[in-house]
Image (spheres, rainbow, N blue to C red):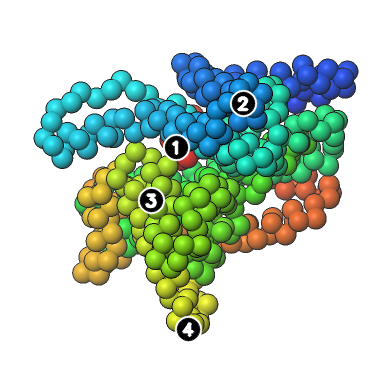
Amino acid sequence: MLFNSYQFLLIFLPIVLIVYFLLNKFRLTKISTIWLIVVSLYFYASWNFKFLWIILASILFNYFTGLLLTGKICHRINNKIILTIGIIINILFLGYYKYTNFLIENINGIFHQNFNYMHVIMPLAISFFTFQQIAYIVDIYKQKIKQPDFLTYTLFITFFPRLMQGPITRGEEMLPQFLSLRTKVINWKNLSLGLFLLTVGLFKKVVFADMLSKWAVAGLSQIDSLTMIESWITVLSYTFQIYFDFSGYTDMAIGIALMFNINVPQNFNNPYIALDIQDFWRRWHITLSRCLKDYVYIPLGGNRKGTFRTYCNIFWVFLICGIWHGASWTYIVWGIMHGIASIINRLYKLLNIEMPKFAAWLITFVFVNISWIYFSASSISSANKLLLSCLNILNFDLPKIYGFDMRFRASGHSWEIYPLIIIPIMIFFIFNNFFRDKLTNFKPKPVYTFYIVFMMLAVFYNLVKPDYSSTFIYFQF
C-alpha cells in the first residue's frame, strides 16, 4: 500500500482517522493506541506478510534491551556491556538482511570463490526502524528518555506515517506526544494543515517526481548512447526526481502524522540552494544528518580529538552514510565523495577566502549532481560512463530544444520535454519557497481549499491513468 494509491487515500486513511478519534471520544485511549499499532502493522505487512515477524522481533529485542538498561530486569550487568551488545545485535540484524549477498559477491570476486548466495529478501524500511531503535537504546543508556510502556514504544516504532521512509525520529520528541491527552482530541487546524501537507507531498510525487522519472529512467537505461546534453538532462532529471520523490513522501508523512496531532520533524529545507556541502547536509535529509552527528560523529570523538582525527571522523560518518543507504559499491562511493567534499570544504574555510555566492552555489550544485550519478547508477562502470559522457564536449549534438523534442537515439523513441526540463526546475524553486512561507503561519482559509482541490485534481488525473505505477526511491533502503 502506497501513500499515492486509491486504497490508502480513499479507504485506509479515512477509516483509521475516524475510528481513532471515535475511540478517544469514548475515552478508550489504550484501545485507540492498540488500533494505531494494528493498522500500522497492517500497513507494513501489506507489502509482504513475511516481513511482519522481523519488525516485531526487532521491537521485542530493543524493548527488552531498554528494560535491562533501566535496571527493571537485572541490576548486575554493566550498562555499557548491555548497550554494546544491543548495538552489535542490531547491526548484525541489519547486516544479515541487507548486506549478506553483497558480502558474498565481493568475497567471490576478490578471492575467486563460488559461494552460493543466501535466499535473503531485504525487509522494507529495515534501515529506518533499525537506526531509530539504536538511537532509542542509546538515549535510554544516556538517560535522555525514560522507558515507556510496551504499547507506546511499539507505536513509536511502527507509527505508519513515518515507518517506511522516516523522518527518523527520537524518543524524546515523539514518546511524550503519544502519551499526551491533547493528541487524542480532534484538532481541526491540524487536520486542515495535515491535509494541505499531504496534498503538497502528493503533488510533488505524482506530478513532478513521476514526470521527471521518465527522463531519468530512459537516460540511465541507455548510458552508452547519450550525448553530452542528453547526459546532463538525465542527471538533472534524477537530481530533481529524488528530491521531489523523497521530500514529497516526507511532506505526506508529516501531514498525515499531524492529522493525528503528532508533530514530526522537518526533513528538508531547500537543499539545492546550499552554498557548500556542509550547508547541503544541514538541508537534505535533516533527521538522518542529526542522527549521524549525534550517534556516530560525536561518539567517534567529533572535533574534540584534534584536526586530523576530526577529518577522519567526518570521513567515517559519510562512509557509514553510504553503507546505510544500500548494499552496493555505488552507494559507498557516493558516501566517500561526500566525505572527501566535506573535508575539502573545511580546509577551504581555513583560508578565510570568501567565494562569490553564485560560484559557491554552482560548485555545490554541480558536485551534488555528479554524486547523484553514482547514487542512481546500477554499477560503478555505468556511473563512470555517464560522468564521462557529461564531460564529453566532443559529443555535444544539441537535441531539438526549441521544438520541445529530445530523442534518446538508442531506443529511437521520443518524449515531450515539458518543455525541456527548465519549467519543472523553475516550478521547484517557486513551489517550495511559496508553500514554505505559507506554512510558517498557517491559518485555515478558503484559498487553501482552492490549492488542495487544484493539486488533488492534478494528482488524480495522473492516478487514473491505466499505466500508472510508481513506488518511492527510498523504499529500497
Q: CA distance from mark 2 to mark 1?
A: 37 Å
**For the residue carrying disc 2, how many other residues have a C-alpha within 10 Å: few (<14), some (14-19), or many (20+)?**
few
Could you tell me which secondary element the residue under label 1 belongs to?
loop
Q: Which residue is mark 2?
A: 75
**Distance (Cα) linking label 4 and label 2:** 56 Å
x and y, in percent, of residue 393 in the image:
25, 70
Counting residues from the N terminus, which is met first, the one under dot 3 or under dot 1? 3
- Disc sitting over residue 353 in the figure: 4
Picture coordinates of residue 370, whole percent (x, y): 36, 60
Q: Residue 21, can we see it?
A: yes
Q: Which residue is mark 3?
A: 319
Tell me the residue at 65%/61% (across/down): 433
Q: Which residue is mark 1?
A: 477
281 with respect to 370 (left or right): right
Badge 4 marks a residue whose secondary structure is loop
Which one is in front, 422 or 12? 12
Asked whether the residues under the numbered discs 1 and 4 touch, taking CB atoms below 8 Å apart as contact, a structural biologist would say no
Q: Amino acid at mark 2?
A: His
Residue 11 screen position, x and y as percent: 67, 22
Q: Amino acid at mark 1?
A: Phe
Q: Quadrant of residue 43?
A: top right
Q: If you read the primary sequence from the N terminus, does the residue marked by circle 1 or circle 4 appear first?
A: 4
For the residues labelled 1 and 4, the Cα–Cα distance comes to 39 Å
Q: CA distance from mark 2 to mark 3?
A: 37 Å
Sequence order check, earlier mark of 2 and 1: 2
